[in-house]
Amino acid sequence: MLLVGVKVVTMKFLNKLNKTEKALLFTAIVLLLIWIVYSLVIEPLYNSWTRLNKDVEIAKIELKKAVKILRQREDVACQYNKYLDRFTTKESDEEEMALILNEIETQARSASIRIINMKPRRVAKNEFYRTFCVDLDTESSMRNILKFIKGLKDSKFSLCVEQLTLNSRARDPSILNGSMAISRFGIIPE
């Protein structure tokens, strides 16, 4: 009944309009319908499609990176094992410290460094690794100290000079008194 009433009112309204007004009303209704279809159907689909395209592009880039990493897997594993062997501590803390002290003395002799004092620190332990530190007082020329530091770094223990203080002697400025903190990072084997 309500629908019939709306139809009668609509027909009376349309009969009162001339041809131009009817064309404008028809155009307005068509534009309104186009806007509704665009807003409710086309734009959400377009946004979804654009978002999916971006996701696909990101996935392609990530996949290329993953493939590149997989190609390098054997090289990385080889390098990892090399460093793992180099940094894994196989001895007890005391034995490891003795080996480190011996290596420091060997490198000092090789670089013509005079060791004045060498004092090991307490081993710092963590769940996965241990840090061995040695305080060292030396006397030598700058060239020999640099040779010593390089020798420590390149040694089988990969020793690191964390702290270095150099002072020149009053009598002979070419000879430097050095104070160093040398450390080694050791991975606890599984």
Image (cartoon, helix red, strand yellow):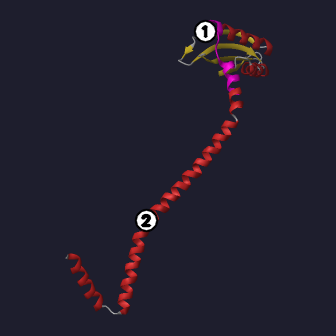
Please state the horizontal and vertical placement of residue 98, each as a whole percent of the image. Answer: 67, 7
Please state the horizontal and vertical placement of residue 87, each as a whole percent of the image. Answer: 66, 19
Residue at left 20%, top 76%?
Answer: 2
Tell me which segment is drawn in magenta: 79-96
On screen, residue 130 versus residue 147, left or right, reads: left
Decide: is 18 above or below 113. below
Earlier-in-chain disc, 2 versus 1: 2
Give neighbour class at mark 1: few <14, some 14-19, many 20+ (Cα, 10 Å): some
Report the residue marked by disc 2. Answer: 41
Q: Secondary structure at mark 2?
A: helix
Residue at left 42%, top 67%?
Answer: 39
Which is the main secondary structure of the residues drawn in magenta? helix
Residue 179 visible to an observer of this rendering: yes
Residue at left 47%, top 61%?
Answer: 45
Q: Secondary structure at mark 1?
A: helix
Decide: is 144 above or below 21. above
Q: 8 or 183, which is in the foreground?
A: 8
Q: Quadrant of residue 189?
A: top right
Q: Quadrant of the N terminus?
A: bottom left
Report the residue marked by disc 1. Answer: 93
Q: Amino acid at mark 2?
A: Val
Decide: is 186 above or below 9. above
Residue 159 visible to an observer of this rendering: no
Q: 161 or 132, which is in the foreground?
A: 132
